[in-house]
Image (spheres, rainbow, N blue to C red):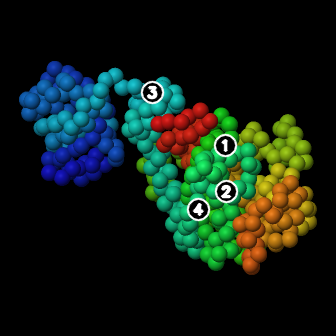
Amino acid sequence: MNRTLISDLKNYLNQEVLLQGWIQEIRNLSKIKFIILRDRTGDMQTLALKAETDQDSFELINTLSKESVVEIQGTAKENKESRWGMEVLIKKITLLSLAETPLPIDNTDKSQTNIDKRLDHRLLDTRNLKHQAIFKVRSKIVRIVTNFFDQNGFTNINSPKLTKIGVESGAELFEVDYFGRPMYLAQSPQVYKQMFVVGGFERVYEIGAVFRAEKSNTMRHLTEFTGVDFEMGFIKDYTDVMDFIELMFIDLMTHLKKDTAAELQLLNVEHQIPQKIPRLTLDEAKKMLAPKGKKYNADEDLDAEGEKLICELIKEKSGSEFVFITHFPWEVKPFYQMKAEDNPQVTKSFDLLFNGVEICSGSQREHRLDVWKKQAVEKGLNPQGMPEYAEIFQYGCPPHGGAGFGLDRITQRLLLLDNVREAVLLPRDPVREKP
């Protein structure tokens, strides 16, 4: 017999089926034994009756443990009293792999096991269907976003993760020994994105690992995360990039509502699809926060509390879970961002906040070589020490801009998870090195 997935059982009522999966629960009575079986598509009640089940199989159930892998042959029957509306009557059960006891964690929905212990035994933790649903949604996010890039003329690139080119703070770089020479784990594909916009592709994107040597032990930071980065050429200004992101998230939320309906229902998550994302300058946001007791200096960014509060205010006002904050001070932004013509103290930059957390940062880049050099010097950098970066602007460089997302944060905020590590299979932070 061919295997039947649990999600397909409704199509096989009163027919013989072959199930394979993990034992989620066992209830062992004298003349009837229940096994809740789980596979990648869901769980199902199966039961063995002493009078109808193969005798060896009936006795075998006494020796089984939770999370053991078994194969069950039986008949799918309607049962309106069960929460599934059906069940499988066991004819024969075969043990494929016996799980050791006791389990190191409780992976049921009633578990009180803390996240650090769960991460130590992630392979057991992800057998929980709710935890598995997080990563099914995350997988769909990647597919939907990739399709959107493709439909809009972007080319996928893969930039080096070992590099000597760094454009962010050097203190946040991981140094590695590269055949006796120092190299660094890439903290951004920024230079490479710009390189290949100018290289003729015009529109490029990458989904890949990004590394930040920050000792940030928070519920929103990681030292290794998955970045969704893109760059687009021949823009009028930074608002073209924001317009693209707005359309991207409308497309993402629309498809997720349809493609992951079962997972979102299991996780009890529902969102309104945005029609238009509100846009505020940083100064406007600060003025809205002032009556709430949040005071900021002129060159100061919003803190985590401010981001959360401004999102709450915008949602009350417009119903939107998203908000763009624009025109960040030159003082706090990288040298390659373009300054605003009407106010050189701010940049043509933006952050996208979603449900209280910044999930994206972007800007229009400075494409004029003379200005680029001047701004590098203003930030205390030596343009002569960045020849590969400078070359991007030497042989014809179009106006361009782009942004970078954190896939982990998008997933976390979309699913309203308390900790970003919930949205990463095997996270890396300042203290976690394994598994």
Residue that label 3 marks: 111
- Nearest to N terminus: mark 4 or mark 2: 4
Residue type marked 4: Ser
Label 4 to label 3: alpha-carbon separation: 41 Å
Towards the viewer: 8 or 297: 297
**Count of numbered badges drawn on the protein:** 4
Q: Quadrant of residue 236?
A: bottom right
Residue type marked 2: Lys
Callout 2 crowding tier (Cα within 10 Å): few <14, some 14–19, many ≥20: some
Residue that label 4 marks: 159
Residue that label 2 marks: 164
Label 3 to label 2: alpha-carbon separation: 45 Å
Label 1 to label 3: alpha-carbon separation: 33 Å
Residue 72 in the image, given as x and y percentages of width and height: 18, 40
Label 1 to label 4: alpha-carbon separation: 19 Å
> Which structural element holds mark 2?
loop
* Residue at (31, 39) in percent of width and height: 38
> Which structural element holds mark 1?
loop
- Nearest to N terminus: mark 4 or mark 3: 3
Towards the viewer: 250 or 61: 61
Residue type marked 3: Ser
* Residue at (34, 45) in percent of width and height: 40
The label number, if any, that marks residue 254 in the structure image = none
Q: Quadrant of residue 29?
A: top left
* Residue at (77, 54) in percent of width and height: 325
* Residue at (86, 62) in percent of width and height: 375
- Nearest to N terminus: mark 1 or mark 4: 4
Dots 4, 2 in contact, CB < 8 A: no
Judge whether 62 appears above or below 125 on screen.
Answer: above
Q: Residue most toward the front?
A: 180
Residue 24 in the image, given as x and y percentages of width and height: 31, 33
